Image (cartoon, helix red, strand yellow):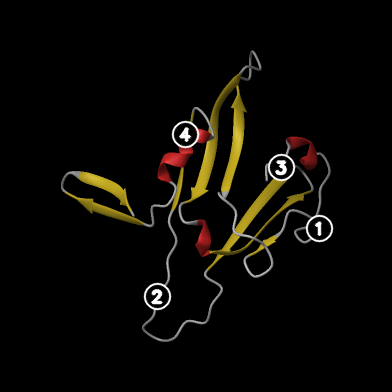
Amino acid sequence: MRIPSSEFFTPFPPDLKFGYRRDTHKTPEHFIRAYHLRDTQSGEAGSWLAGLTLDQSVVYEAWCSQRPGGIIVMIEEIHGKPIKAGESFSAAHTVGYFDTIEEIDRYKGHTALTADKSGWRLVN
């Protein structure tokens, strides 16, 4: 679901709309939070400032709200299952500037980050 910017003209609390829970909703294709930047002088469209949860199945709950003053908050809770001593869980996200929202798809499905002398890379 894409939420149009017109939904953010009036403040709203976290539980009012745009909520997701893994136990009550189908897992979406993406969890992308993005803002389309514009040139302040001309108003022309620019890059997207975007973040993507690389493995959307780790998201247990997600929601957004708009606070007075225009502050938009987007929250994701991951895992949502009991953890015993010695167990672990993780999530990987990528954040950056992209020319198109579709461009961010190249990272989808990666679940880990590895680094060595040659640099870092995402792995499945």
Measure the alpha-carbon separation of dots 2 and 4. Answer: 31 Å
Measure the alpha-carbon separation of dots 1 and 4. Answer: 31 Å
Q: Secondary structure at mark 1?
A: loop
Q: Which mark is residue 88?
A: 2
Residue situated furthest left in the rendering:
117
Is there any visible trace of residue 96 in the rendered image? no
Residue at image point 69% right, 67% down: 24
Q: Which mark is residue 3?
A: 3
What x and y, as percent, mark residue 118? 17, 44
What x and y, as percent, mark residue 84? 44, 86
Is there any visible trace of residue 104 in the rendered image? yes
Does 122 sit above or below residue 37? below
Q: Earlier in the sequence, mark 2 or mark 1?
A: 1
Measure the alpha-carbon separation of dots 1 and 3. Answer: 14 Å
Q: Earlier in the sequence, mark 1 or mark 4?
A: 1
What x and y, as percent, mark residue 33? 59, 45
Q: Secondary structure at mark 4?
A: helix
Q: Secondary structure at mark 3?
A: loop
Q: Earlier in the sequence, mark 2 or mark 4?
A: 2
* Residue corresponding to mark 4: 103
Q: Which mark is residue 42?
A: none
User: Foreground mark, 1 or 3?
Assistant: 3
Compared across the picture, whether 83 is left or right of 7 comes to: left
Q: Which mark is residue 16?
A: 1
